[in-house]
Amino acid sequence: MIFRNREEAGQMLGESLLELSLDPVVLAIPRGGVVVAAQVARVLGASLDVIVPAKIRAPYQPELGIGAVAADGTRVLDEDAIAVLGVTEDYLAREIELRLQEIQRRAVAYRGDRPEIELAGRDVVIVDDGIATGWTARCAARSVRNRSPKSVILAVPVAPMEGVSRLEGDCDRVVCLQSPEPFLAVGRWYRDFDQVGDEEVLAALREVA
């Protein structure tokens, strides 16, 4: 199955979550995840907010992720890649500090002066438009767990089976509409997978609010 766009994927994902009888807060991983999550929140009648983990970049290869960090300092690291690349503790410390600054900038841009939604005792549904390596999703789930939710559910339209299995240890439930093999890339499973800009993120958040 190939989704027409993120909106269709979000509608289908929301409908698949209805049977869980949740009292949910939906947290979107920007940017593409916000478009999907807005539809999920509408279907569930839930509040919508963002969670902004950031990829920790390999030295000299910024496109290569070696882990992720969240706003509260929660981090997950690809220890194998770090060892193979010879990444030093000094580099990791500098890179994590840079990523935390970027997280703060993006959180302010998306949330403005609105306070974060209280998660304690709530079912928290973390939504992205798909999973490739899963580092940011794992980091988001662990960060949410620190805020005493009732449950942590990761919901995505598409992800490789290996990625789903890896994430099950960090979540109470992983909801994934399809896990095709070979996976190739998230965008392969959407007809329209255009890049999502900050203005589209803000519009989606405003519409749900």
Image (spheres, helix red, strand yellow):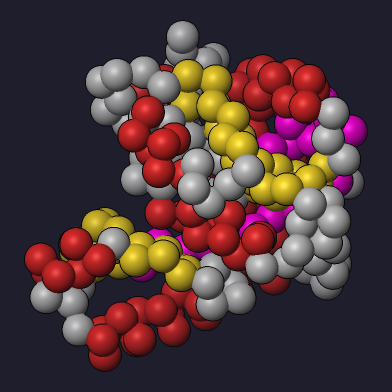
* Rendered view: 207 above or below 75: above
Q: Is residue 177 visible?
A: yes
Answer above or below: position of 93 versus 196: below
Count every numbered label the image shows and give the total.
0
Q: Residue at x 40, y 43 (%)?
A: 166
Q: Residue 27 or 83: which is nearer the viewer? A: 83
Instruction: Report whether 50 appears left or right of 78.
Output: right
**Frontmost residue, 3 versus 162:** 162
Q: Which residues are magenta?
A: 37-56
Q: What residue is shown at x 69% (from left), y 55% (from top)?
A: 50
Closer-to-camera residue (123/28): 123
**44 versus 80 height, above or below:** above
Q: In the figure, residue 148 lies in which quadrant?
A: bottom right
Q: Which residue does the image show at 19% across and 62% down from the upper left?
A: 80
Q: Position of residue 38 (x, y in %)?
A: 74, 37
Q: Is residue 200 in view?
A: no
Q: Position of residue 69 (x, y in %)?
A: 47, 69
Q: Position of residue 9 (x, y in %)?
A: 60, 22
User: Which quadrant of the view contains residue 90?
Assistant: bottom left
Q: Residue at x 54, y 77 (%)?
A: 73
Q: Is residue 82 magenta?
A: no
Q: Position of residue 68 (x, y in %)?
A: 42, 64
